[in-house]
Image (tube, helix red, strand yellow):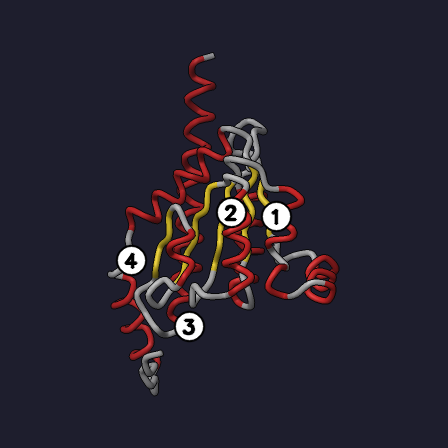
Amino acid sequence: MNKVTEILQARQYFEEQQRVATGLSHKDIDRIADVLVKAQEFGRTLYIFGNGGSASLASHLACDLGKGTAYSNGGNRLRVMSLADNLATLTAWANDVSYEEVFSEQLRNFVRAEDVAFAISGSGNSKNVLNALRAAREAKAITVGITGFQGGQMKDLCDVCVVVPSNDMQIIEDLHLAMAHSIFRIVLSRMSRHAMTASACE
């Protein structure tokens, strides 16, 4: 792992954040949003997961997508679940099997072909995230993700993966949140436009 730049002033941090942001693939962020819109259109389910700060973001994004789009398409809602939210289930799988399977075993209860597994990992190498992506692929689900560093092993397990080109975990997490919000806004706008178009055709 490369040494993280020492930050002694706020200006340094935000200059680095802005520098890294210019290296993001807007095209791939749009592709993830496209996958989510298509999932909504065909009644597929979206599962989001990650550890630590990424678990918090999984919950945050699931809330934005589930509640924030609820009234945007005539009641045709996006089915979304964060796999980081059920503490009893997480600890049961961790205790009785292993922490490496806390997301994959949850997925095996629910995931179906053409559903979407959305992985969030700063390193791209969290074993429980990788195992969940493998379980999703076994079920013929679509896999997408956001990560950092060089993408880790996660990159090859995702149909679409956006890598934040940084080795600074705080910068990576900042831009993961920004990407999550951009994806939410795109999905919301697309769903709302679809509803208006359908209404105009009636």
Above or below for 71 versus 86:
above
Above or below for 126 versus 185:
below
Question: Percent x, y for residue 154?
Answer: 42, 58
Q: CA distance from mark 2 to mark 3?
A: 24 Å
Q: Are marks 2 and 1 in contact (CB under 8 Å)?
A: yes
Q: CA distance from mark 2 to mark 1?
A: 9 Å
Residue indicated by mark 2 = 117
Element at label 1: helix
Q: Are marks 1 and 4 in contact (CB under 8 Å)?
A: no
Q: CA distance from mark 3 to mark 4?
A: 16 Å
Residue indicated by mark 1 = 107
Q: Are marks 2 and 3 in contact (CB under 8 Å)?
A: no
Q: Are marks 3 and 1 in contact (CB under 8 Å)?
A: no
**Label 4 is placed on what type of residue?**
Leu
Q: Are marks 4 and 2 in contact (CB under 8 Å)?
A: no
Element at label 2: strand
Residue indicated by mark 4 = 24
Of the image marks 1 and 4, the number of the one nearer the N terminus? 4
Residue indicated by mark 3 = 170
Of the image marks 4 and 2, the number of the one nearer the N terminus? 4
Of the image marks 3 and 1, the number of the one nearer the N terminus? 1
Q: Which residue is at a point 50% across and 42% down the rendered structure image?
A: 116
**Label 3 is placed on what type of residue?**
Gln
**Label 2 is placed on what type of residue?**
Ala
Above or below for 191 versus 132:
above
